[in-house]
Amino acid sequence: MSLNEADFTLHLAQGETHFVAGEYEAALSAYATASSLAPLETAPLAGLALTYHALGQVTQARRVWKVLLSRDSRYLTLRWLRTELHWPDALLAEAKKLIDIV
């Protein structure tokens, strides 16, 4: 694993940890860093969208979510998010809210 891959994985995990803890500003920062390290990866985009939504920034959340869906429409399927990505309940609950308005 290269340094960038390790950094990417670390920041993605930190984003999830902060999100689950309700530390949305810290989650946003971690997801943004992960996205800058791997701009073509969808996972940090999902994290950004969910975090924007949790912060009440609905317009920004919808914009990022639509970009995400243009890359991978499976993010519309909660079962896939649960079984394939192993998202914790906090992420799944926020994803459901966002899916319902997109």
Image: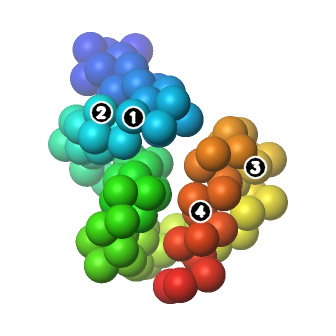
Residue drawn where x is 35% and y is 57% of the image: 55
Near-viewer residue (78 or 1):
78
* Mark 2 and mark 4: Cα distance apart in space: 19 Å
Q: Which mark is residue 26?
A: 2
Q: Is residue 28 above or below residue 6?
A: below
Please give left or right for residue 63 compared with residue 91 in the image: left
Residue drawn where x is 61% and y is 81% of the image: 100
Query: Of tags 3 and 2, which is closer to the observer?
Result: 2
Q: Where's residue 75, x and y in %?
A: 60, 66
Please give left or right for residue 92 compared with residue 47 in the image: right
* Mark 4 and mark 1: Cα distance apart in space: 17 Å
Circle 1 residue: 23
Q: Earlier in the sequence, mark 3 or mark 4?
A: 3
* Mark 2 and mark 1: Cα distance apart in space: 6 Å
Please give left or right for residue 84 compared with residue 54 in the image: right
Q: Amino acid at mark 2?
A: Ala
Circle 3 residue: 82
Circle 1 Cα neighbour tier, 10 Å, few/some/many (<14 / 14–19 / ≥20)? some
